[in-house]
Structures are given as structure tokens and as C-alpha cells.
Amino acid sequence: MPAKVRQQLKSARRIVIKVGSHTVCSNMVANGEAADSDTRDASPSLNIGLNIEACKRIASQIQELHKNYEVLLVSSGSVAAGAMARGLTAIPHDIPTKQALAALGQGRLMRAWEDAFSEWKDHISLAQVLLTHDDLADRRRYLNSRQTLLTLLNEYKAIPVINENDTVATDELRYGDNDRLAARVAQMVMADGLVLLSDVDGLYSADPHVDAEAEHFPLVSEITEEILAMAGATGSAVGSGGMLTKLQAAKIATHAGCVTIVACGAVEHPLQSLADGGKCTVFPAEGTPAAARKQWLAGILVVSGELRIDDGAARALANGSSLLPVGLVAVSGNFRRGDVVSLVNAAGVELGRGLATYTSDEATAIIGCRSEQIEARLGYCGKSVLVHRDDLVVFQKPESGNVSHD
């Protein structure tokens, strides 16, 4: 692993780990093929279809990581767990049945992780979070999801266990998208690292199960069309993703400033193996998560409204603070929560822009308001900031006319 990448991971504070169905589930097949005899004859039970020992091994390593990092776990396996709970030896193709099986299996999957983490003396709270790509596409739902995850990490020191909400999603079930979901989560919480654990130990020039001469790529600096063309079809009978979704996930995450690693989850201690220099493919990050987010905000061409602020608020922004209602002087435009707004000073000069945590009507109601007064103004307890510093890019400092995309 290159020294630069090692340094990026060493200085990381937030990591997303995605485990695929092949890693957490017992040997089960799709397309009507028979399963191994030990699973075919098994009677339904709480953890049937889930490889509990694998979950325990991963949990023990996450337990160690959690001492120094904030960790989010994206776990596949609900459909396979549900299928095995019903005594099925194959995963059906039709979407309604898969959705029903996901509903049956999700509780079993979560219980498996709860049991796995309970093995260790240092208790860590787990929190189940079910998301769809619609949740991440809609700005308000995106912000709600993001705030929930950050609260779990920062206030409760919990590990979110995230999966697709397969009972309502359809495209995800059809194409297998937990890889890209993990990348979107990494992007959403500004994670520094993304680890995709699957049944492969990285990118090859061809399917290594078919071509013994296939070349392994330990480092991919840029995901080109040629690289994407190397990705084959689904590699696991239990999972529904493949190398293509992992490359697409890596592209999303690295653009968001997140180092991405594709490695095999079937080894005895997959995360420790990576730390010891185990075989994998590394996709270096393009900058940092904060820089990537601010670059995106700076590039927004259309803003939905304007927040005029006083000199004190302008100085606070230049020093890296969030925008508080007490520094707000006037509101222009009609915007919703999560829309991009421009921040201007008394002279009308744009100092920066960011994502509004309130609608234009709500922002107007709390102009000049101190944090403890927000509830009285709005009738409910809202956020203490109008624009959070993580969702803010400052163009121009109040004492200077030079533009600087900090």
C-alpha cells in the first residue's frame, strides 16, 4: 500500500465498512441450484443462513477499530437470511418475494450482529438504519439521515448498522447495490475510509476463478473506462452485486475524498489482514472529504435564496464557525431545508454559500434569535445553526477582497 494512502488511513477518524452477503451468510445459492447439505437440511432458527462465526470475527476487529475511529457498518444478508429461515435452498428472482424475505431476514441479521458484538466486554451500542437511494437523492431526507447518523456517532458513540430498506426498494434488490449505498453513506458522513469486504480480494484483469493468469491490481489511481470494462458479472450466488458495483462505489467515494479498499472478507481476520498488508486493491482519495464537499458547494451555479449577515457573523464564518441565527439580518428568496443559499454581508458581497437547515419562512422567524430562543419563536425545538460549518464554503473573508475557496 502506498505511503500516501497509509498516511490517509492513519489520520482517518471515520470509516465505513461494508460486508457482503458472501461474507456474513452460510453457503447458499441462487437460480434454483442446490445448497450445501448442511444448510439444505437445517431447520429454521434465529440465526439460520448467517455465518455467526464470521460475524463474530468481524465484530471483534470493529471493536478494536472503534477505540480510535468512528465506524459505520453496512451489512448485506437480509434476503438470504430470510430465505434460509423459510427453509428455502435458493433465492427467488421475483421482487415481491425478495422483499418479503428481506422483511423476514432483517431482524435475524440485526440479531446476529447484536450477538456478535455482545461477545466482547466493552459494550458498544448498535443502531439499525435502513436506507434507500431515494433517501439519499431527496435533499431533506438526505439531511435527516445524515443528522441521525452523526448523532449516533457523536453523541451516543454507537455503530450504525446500515442496510438497504429492501421491503420498499426495488432497483436495489434487482441489481444489488449495497456497495454504492456504502459509498453514498461514506460521502454523506464525510468518511475518510471505505472498506468493501466481499468474496474477492480486489480487482483483476479477468475473473481469477476462471483465468489462472488473471493479473491482480493492488493500486488503481484512476477508474477509467478501461478499468470499468474489466469488471465481470455478479460473483456470488448469495450476493447480487459484483466488481462493477464496487468500482462504481470506489468512484463515488474517492471523489468525495474517501480512500476505498476492496478486500476479501472470507479470510480469518479480514480487517487485521489489511492492517498487516494483506492482498487488496486500493483506490486513493482525491483530496479530503471536507475539501471535496466544499468544492461541490462552490461549484453550485444556482442558489435558492440569500442570507444577509452582520459583521460579527462574517468574522465567525471566516474563522471556521457555523452560521447562527443571532448573526442573521435578513432573508431573501424561497428555499427549503437542504437547499443551497448564498451568504452575503451588509454590502451585498457574497462571502460564501451553504446548505440551509431551515426553510426561508423559518429562517425569517428566527432572525437575530439566540439559540435558546428558537423554540419560543418556532413553536418547536429546532437546530441551533442556520448553516453548519461542514455544509459551508467561505469564498471571501470580510477583511479581504481576495477570493479564496477554503
Image (cartoon, helix red, strand yellow):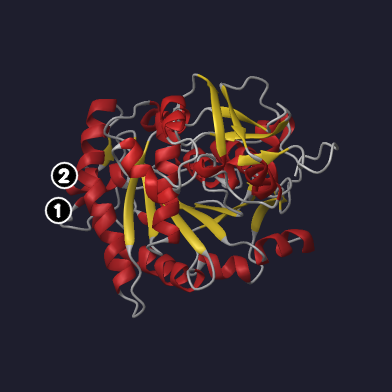
Q: Please determine whether, in this image, residue 203 is positioned above or below residue 267.
A: above
Identity of the residue drawn at 19% across and 43% down: 104
Counting other residues with Cα less than 10 Å from the Cα at mark 2, is it few (<14), some (14-19), or many (20 or more)? some
Camera-side residue of 274 and 146: 146
Task: Give me the disc on residue 86.
Answer: 2
Coordinates of residue 24 in the picture (x, y in percent) = 37, 56
- Which quadrant of the view contains residue 238? top left
- The answer to whether residue 275 is left or right of residue 144 is right
Tell me the quadrant of the picture where the C terminus can be found.
Answer: top right
Q: Earlier in the sequence, mark 1 or mark 2?
A: 1
Most distant residue in the bottom direction: 121
Residue for badge 1: 44
Q: Amino acid at mark 2?
A: Arg
Camera-side residue of 153 and 211: 153
Tell me the quadrant of the picture where the N terminus can be found.
Answer: bottom right
Counting other residues with Cα less than 10 Å from the Cα at mark 1, is it few (<14), some (14-19), or many (20 or more)? some
- The answer to whether residue 160 is left or right of residue 295 is left
Coordinates of residue 183 in the picture (x, y in percent) = 54, 43
Task: Give me the disc on residue 52.
Answer: none
Q: Amino acid at mark 1?
A: Pro
Coordinates of residue 358 in the picture (x, y in percent) = 44, 33
Identity of the residue drawn at 55% across and 70% down: 272
Are the residues tagged 1 and 2 within 8 Å (C-beta)? yes
